[in-house]
Image (spheres, rainbow, N blue to C red):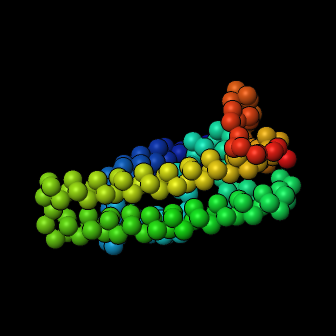
Amino acid sequence: MSRRCLRSFSLAPVALLFAVSTTAQQPPYAGREARPIKALSADEIAAYLAGEGMGLALAAELNGYPGPRHVLDLADSLVLSDTQRAAVQGMFDAMLVEARRLGAAIVESERRLDDAFAEGSVDGRSLETVLGRIGALQAELRFTHLAAHLAVRDVLSPDQIDRYRRLRGYAAPADAGHVHHPSRRPAGHSQR
């Protein structure tokens, strides 16, 4: 090996160590102080205002309770009847209206929290109040998304639910009886 190659080779670990140590010294929140709402990124604000799921319904989605948005996207592959399609569309529309309302309220509450800290007007009592409001709104938002999954499941047949899971790329569940076959269907429900 040439002397030049050896020198380059021996300096590589030093350069790597310098790059790692420089990155490690960067404060984790640097740059976020310019955000309009410090605790929320622009993407998070947009997602709240758009009524997006943001992973709030994963407990349902990954346990055999399909989401209305994805069911509508896969309607042809799931061979939804016109009645099923209309029912799921109605569920999705209602969920979206409520999710957007709640998302806007969360963003506004986060803005108030940020403003209170920026103005120095926050105290223990006001902090407890605004955090209670944010927590309640987040719980309502999650309920809205999960309840939509719960409702959609009752409109689909077990075969459609199985097909949905496969189309979404989910592994077969460990307890197929628990995931695929709900123990209770609403009165008058027929399997399609």
Count of numbered marks? 0
Q: In which quarter of the image is residue 172?
A: top right
Q: Which residue is drawn at 71% across and 43% down?
A: 187
**Quarter of the figure that contains the N terminus:** top right
Q: Residue at x 70, y 64 (%)?
A: 89
| Residue 184, x across and y down, in percent | 68, 36
Q: Quadrant of residue 162?
A: top right
Q: In this view, does 99 lie above or below 28?
A: below
| Residue 65, x across and y down, in percent | 66, 44
Q: Quadrant of residue 134?
A: bottom left
Q: Residue at x 39, y 67 (%)?
A: 105
Decide if residue 162 is in sight here: no
| Residue 108, x across and y down, in percent | 35, 69
Q: Which residue lies furthest to the front in this view?
A: 188
| Residue 4, x across and y down, in percent | 54, 51
Decide if residue 44 is in sight here: yes
93 or 173, which is in the foreground?
Answer: 93
Q: Is residue 63 above or below residue 97?
A: above
184 or 114, which is in the foreground?
Answer: 184
Q: Which residue is drawn at 67% across and 64% down?
A: 90
In the displayed structure image, the side of residue 45 where residue 191 appears, left or right: right
